[in-house]
Image (cartoon, helix red, strand yellow):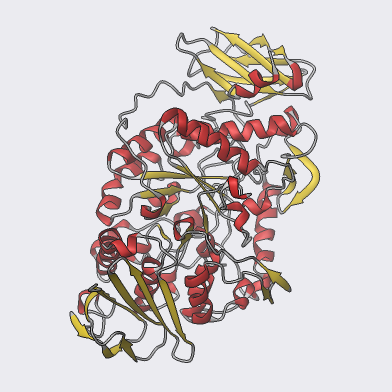
Amino acid sequence: MSYDDLMAMRPGVTFDARGEAQVLVWAPKAEKLQLQFGEEAKMLDMEPKDYGFWTLQTRALWPGDRYRFLLDGKGPYPDPATLYQPEGVHGPSEAFDLQEYEWSDRNWKNPSMKDYIIYELHTGTFTEEGTFAAVEAKLDHLVELGVNAIELMPVSQFAGDRNWGYDGVFPYSTQNSYGGPAMLQQLVDACHEKGIAVILDMVYNHLGPEGNTLGHFGHYFTDKYHTPWGDAINFDDAWSDAVRHYFVQNALMWFRDFHIDALRLDAVHAIKDFSPVHILQEIRQQVDALVRETGREHYLIVEMDLNDTRFVKPIEAGGYGMHAQWVDEFHHALRVSSGQERNGYYVDFDGVASLGKSFRDAYVFDGLYSDHRKRKFGIKADGIPGQQFIVFSQNHDHIGNRMLGERTSQLVSFEMQKLLAGTVFVSPFVPLLFMGEEWAEPNPFQYFVSHTEEELAEAVRKGRKSEFAAFHLEGEAPDPMAVSTFENSKLQWALIDQPPHGTMLQYYRQWIVLRKSQQLLRECDRNGLSVEVFGEKELLCIQRVWGRQHLVAFLNFSKSSQEVSLPFEHLSWHKLMASSDSAWNGPLEMPEQAEAGALTVAAESITVYANIINS
């Protein structure tokens, strides 16, 4: 079997149309590899191939069978590319036929990136049940809200039943406590039926600690580089071809076999790869080939602590070709503008001045000196369209990384919450919401794990405490291992019909209606945007133009009402949204129509007017 033939195969166990199992394992460290399966622990010898691969074709293994591998008689270990771990990370793998599900989404079309309105959720805490089936039962709420894309925090198998998901150890698997792979396929199908795209959060920068057995099989890790989680995944050292194959095929599997619409790749700045073709670029090239084959559009979104446009520039322009990235700096500037404390990595941000810069330039630090980093940081994002930047007023990280996990609803006033939401929607970028923010959920979202190894659990507790040293916080962080920490982080669905939560929900719905119906807001156009910053007043004036439509937004972050001016004497303006209106329990009703000139806007408010420019 040639090198190219091996690289075209999918790792793990797959089944052909006749029901025959094909098994591919990369285990260059083994001199003998055996498949152990069934209640009788039957053994089948794997056949060695070149480059450390082992293969097997058999009719003895069927979907639903439990199996493991013996390496030179040691083990047994789960499949590195296991699709399902019904007994958790330490148990056997279960053979699963990816082709068995009958899809009903033949007519589904993935929305364009500029039209995404993303809703991030954690499967375990989104509902009381914490399963894929329970998420499916809440889809009508999301349809009524108006979002058209959900982003699932990582669902690859992790230790225990409680985890954010970033400690997964089997990238091909689907968490057993959530319902496993069949239920994920069903959820995606149901989402598509209701017009909702599905983004899956994947971690390609490290694997979790408990149950991580890949190192027994092959050179998946390298000590050439180190990351916050230990040795880096081996993307460019000796033996790295097979490791790259493992992760490229993983991305393709989610798109091809689970009909996932986009992957959000976690912390790609921690991926260490100095190959001529970066692993992200290779993934993009392979995804493009899949798109040409299937006709279905798929996106790659990255989170990174780098203001580096190489990641989002097209491959032909020397970039890695990622379709979009999260912009943490927009969030940081927005948070400081709202009057929250400036500590840790927030010390670099100067309220509305930084927020105005992020509106204009996406990156706040684009070659400027960062006092937090003690060096210049970032490059300019000129020429990168707005749909390649995803912004938010809160997400899992910036809530859960607080010591007590407080949401924005517990940190700022009701009026300020409305202003923060409106700021995201009026931006020329792609908006993202975090589950529950649409009704001002008061429960926290805290950091939780359920490791079964006590030494590891204690290490997590200590690491959590030291993490807050940079923020000079006193007190005790909630115990990540405690069941109560997990339970306290669940959404309270009963609140959505109660004041003021119901009002906030209607407010979010109206913003999403505007985002969809107003072409100027739909078009993520950075060119037709201007920003005026009034630092002493803690006020921003945002103007956006698209075609013949002109929009003016006043963002007042101060605790006082402010006098502002609508521009252009010859124009008359109509109100699109005012967070201070009585419909949203606000203190000041803004006029439906206004002439150019002086206008008073309420404290902690966003006021938006628009008109049609006469040619």
Give the quarter of the image for residue 559. bottom left
In this rendering, does residue 582 appear at all?
A: yes
How many numbered discs, if any?
0
Residue at the farthest front position: 615
Give the quarter of the image for residue 534. bottom left
88 shown above or below 154? above
Which of the two residues, 512 or 312, is positioned nearer the viewer here?
312
Which of the two residues, 60 or 227, is positioned nearer the viewer here?
227
Q: Give the left or right position of residue 448, taking residue 465 as reference.
A: left
Residue at image location 68% in from the left, 75% down from the top? 369
Location of the N terminus by quadrant is top right
Q: Give the left or right position of residue 226, taking residue 538 as reference.
A: right
202 shown above or below 54? below
Q: How far across and down, in percent of the image, does residue 9 sit?
A: 60, 21
Q: Give the left or right position of residue 305, taking residue 561 as reference.
A: right
Q: How far across and down, in percent of the image, does residue 546 sit?
A: 33, 66
In this rendering, does residue 452 appear at all?
A: no
Residue at image location 58% in from the left, 59% down from the top? 479
Residue at image location 45% in from the left, 54% down from the top? 487
312 shown above or below 359? above
Which of the two residues, 451 or 182, is positioned nearer the viewer here?
182
